Image: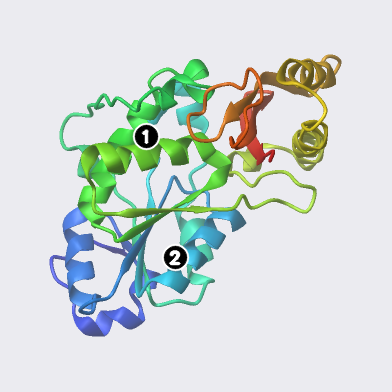
Amino acid sequence: MQINANSLSLQAVNFISMNVFTTKHALQKAISAVREVNSTLGFVPTMGALHEGHLSLIQTALDENELVVVSIFVNPTQFNNSSDLEHYPRSLALDKTKLESLGSSKILIYAPEVDDVYGEAISTSTFDFGGLEAQMEGKFRPGHFDGVGTVVHQLFKIVSPDFAYFGEKDFQQLAIINKLVELTESPVQIVGCPIARAENGLALSSRNTRLSLEEQGHAAKIFAILKEVKQKFGTKNANELKEWVNHQFDNDAVLSLEYFEISDEITLKPMRNKQPNTVYRAFIAVHIRDVRLIDNIALN
């Protein structure tokens, strides 16, 4: 059942997680109807195709707030590849079932159409993220972070959350969102959550659904390489590690390396020479066919 109603009674709180709000007006009415005085509102923005990683974010939000909004919206402005947008998995009915499996009446699902978020014309704002957007993902996906910033800012205005939850798998995005909050002076606190992984170490991603079981098994190599990089970090410099990682993909018929970088965790600038009192993180992007997978690991 989808709700576009203009009003919602307090009694609806017991079954509100069973419904999908398709307009911001209906969502805001629902929030006003069920939110208690001095309660906190958590927000987990997603593009759907929910997996255990998403559910762990949502569970954390549920544990820390009296009410949680989960958005399911495939945002067109953050895709620089039209094929990736076209093939991005969409499964609203299944997503709804997974959210209901959490057994909470505290969840509001917001699954809008594009025009409800952007109005009649889609436009992308431009942000100065202080150079964070120029590294790694920004080099290979031009305009991506302006698109991310645009939709997240719009969603923050619609939902008005106290806390918003993001996974560290998209660590660069997490840094960008923190900067966005600073730039826009948004009254929301960003909460970063650990990477959720499959038993074989593969970082959970909606894109994993496009991989065969055999390919998912092969993709476990990504995290295995990152773990070995962490072990070698104390004795090898950045260039040696990059050469070693590149060599791991030289004769791989399944995985194709797009980039590997060791960066300052705060500025995201590539490490040249290891500096004291600096936290470093390794970042990687790999392709299996036309499926793009990213991952990262803290090094020290």
Q: Residue at x 64, y 53 (%)?
A: 196
Say above or below: 113 vs 63.
Answer: above
The quadrant in which residue 169 appears is: top right
Which of the labelled discs sits on residue 218, or is there none? none
Q: Residue at x 72, y 20 (%)?
A: 256
- The kind of residue on which mark 1 rests is Val
Q: Earlier in the sequence, mark 2 or mark 1?
A: 2
Look at the image and tell me whether residue 237 can be seen: yes
Which of the labelled discs sits on residue 61, or is there none? 2
Q: Residue at x 44, y 22 (%)?
A: 82
Q: Residue furthest bottom?
A: 11
Residue at label 1? 148
Q: Pointer 1: residues within 10 angstroms few (<14), some, or many (20+)? A: many
Colouring chosen for the image of the structure? rainbow
Q: Is residue 14 left or right of residue 282?
A: left
Q: Is residue 273 left or right of residue 13?
A: right
Alpha carbons under labels 2 and 1: distance apart: 21 Å
The quadrant in which residue 29 appears is: bottom left
Query: Which residue occupies the foreground of this view, 199 or 29?
Result: 199
Q: Residue 225 appears at what percent x and percent y?
A: 79, 33
Q: Residue at x 51, y 59 (%)?
A: 57
Query: Which residue occupies the foreground of this view, 101 or 78?
Result: 78
Q: Is residue 239 left or right of residue 159?
A: right
Element carrying mark 1: helix
Q: Residue 40 appears at what percent x and percent y?
A: 30, 70
Look at the image and tell me whether residue 23 can be seen: no
Q: Residue 176 appears at what percent x and percent y?
A: 40, 35
